[in-house]
Image: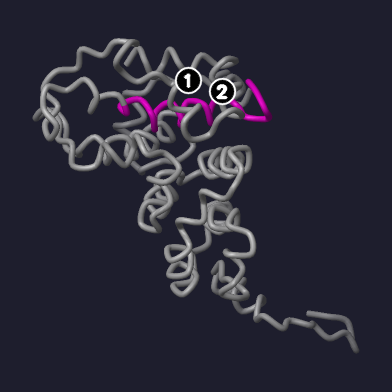
């Protein structure tokens, strides 16, 4: 409620969007004006627990190729923010549906359709995104309502403080672990005996998942500082 005589000026219908918990573009040209907003829309939806307006999704997908115009530092910042919020797995699926994830991380796109041994349910791509969700469960960021899962994951309250510690560039250990989970299998395609079926994982630093190479390709140079401070390279290449 507003004070008597006070009128809300809402030319874009923002109040209705807030009530519906919807992120909506104010104009179809907003993404061409600043392609960085392509990621920001997904990030805001994840951060606020909102959904993306269908027309906004259509325009984001139509403009997805413009993401190449955005500086690596801005891409790094938006991607890290998306990963930092609870429910990051769902946000990654949205990025993929909007044709953005593969443009950010081409190595992940190459994992689509690459099957794994019978112990795995998903292909390498699906497994990589699901790993982010499982990391959140291990870190108690999200819960699936299953006490049996919690009983098999040792935890101590001191770990809350540990994973909240900043390691580089304002990013904490929790974010770095989710990033490592996302990238931990990107080298499988390069070392498998088959293009379509991963049968052997003789993963070596010389021909496997070199995290420095990956970050240099899609988020260079800014994200490498996280690798240097947190040892993410060891997590990825040693998997």
Residue contact between numbered discs 1 and 2, judged by CB atoms under 8 Å:
yes
* Residue at image point 45% right, 56% down: 65
Q: Quadrant of the N terminus?
A: bottom right
Front residue of 29/50: it is 29
For label 2, the SS is helix
Tell me the number on the disc at residue 202. none
Residue 239 higher or lower than 4, as above or below = above
* Residue at image point 51% right, 52% down: 67
Mark 1 neighbour class, 10 Å CA radius: few under 14, some 14 to 19, many 20 or more: some
User: Per the image, is 208 magenta?
Assistant: no
Residue 187, quarter of picture: top left
Front residue of 182/2: it is 182
Residue 118 higher or lower than 88, as above or below = above
Dot placed on the residue nearer the N-terminal end, 1 or 2: 1
Read off the magenta span. 166-186
Q: Position of residue 204 (x, y in %)?
A: 29, 10
Tell me the number on the disc at residue 212. 1
Tell me the number on the disc at residue 224. 2
User: Per the image, is 177 magenta?
Assistant: yes
Q: Position of residue 173 (x, y in %)?
A: 56, 24
């Amino acid at each position: 409620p507003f004070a008597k005589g006070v009128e809300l000026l809402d030319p874009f219908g923002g109040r209705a969007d807030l009530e519906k918990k919807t992120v909506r573009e104010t104009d179809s040209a907003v993404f061409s004006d600043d392609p960085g907003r392509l990621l920001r829309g997904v990030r805001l939806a994840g951060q606020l627990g909102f959904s993306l307006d269908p027309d906004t999704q259509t325009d984001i997908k139509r403009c997805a190729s413009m993401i190449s115009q955005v500086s690596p530092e801005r891409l790094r910042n938006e991607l890290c923010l998306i990963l930092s919020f609870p429910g990051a797995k769902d946000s990654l699926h949205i990025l993929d549906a909007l044709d953005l994830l593969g443009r950010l991380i081409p190595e992940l796109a190459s994992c689509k359709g690459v099957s794994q041994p019978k112990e795995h349910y998903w292909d390498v791509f699906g497994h990589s995104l699901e790993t982010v969700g499982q990391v959140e469960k291990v870190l108690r960021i999200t819960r699936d309502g299953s006490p049996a899962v919690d009983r098999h994951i040792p935890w101590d309250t001191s770990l809350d403080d540990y994973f909240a510690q900043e390691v580089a560039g304002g990013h904490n250990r929790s974010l770095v672990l989710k990033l490592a989970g996302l990238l931990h299998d990107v080298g499988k395609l390069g070392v498998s005996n088959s293009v379509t079926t991963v049968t052997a994982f003789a993963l070596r630093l010389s021909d496997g998942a070199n995290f420095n190479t990956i970050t240099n390709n899609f988020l260079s140079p800014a994200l490498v500082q996280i690798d240097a401070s947190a040892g993410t390279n060891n997590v990825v290449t040693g998997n």
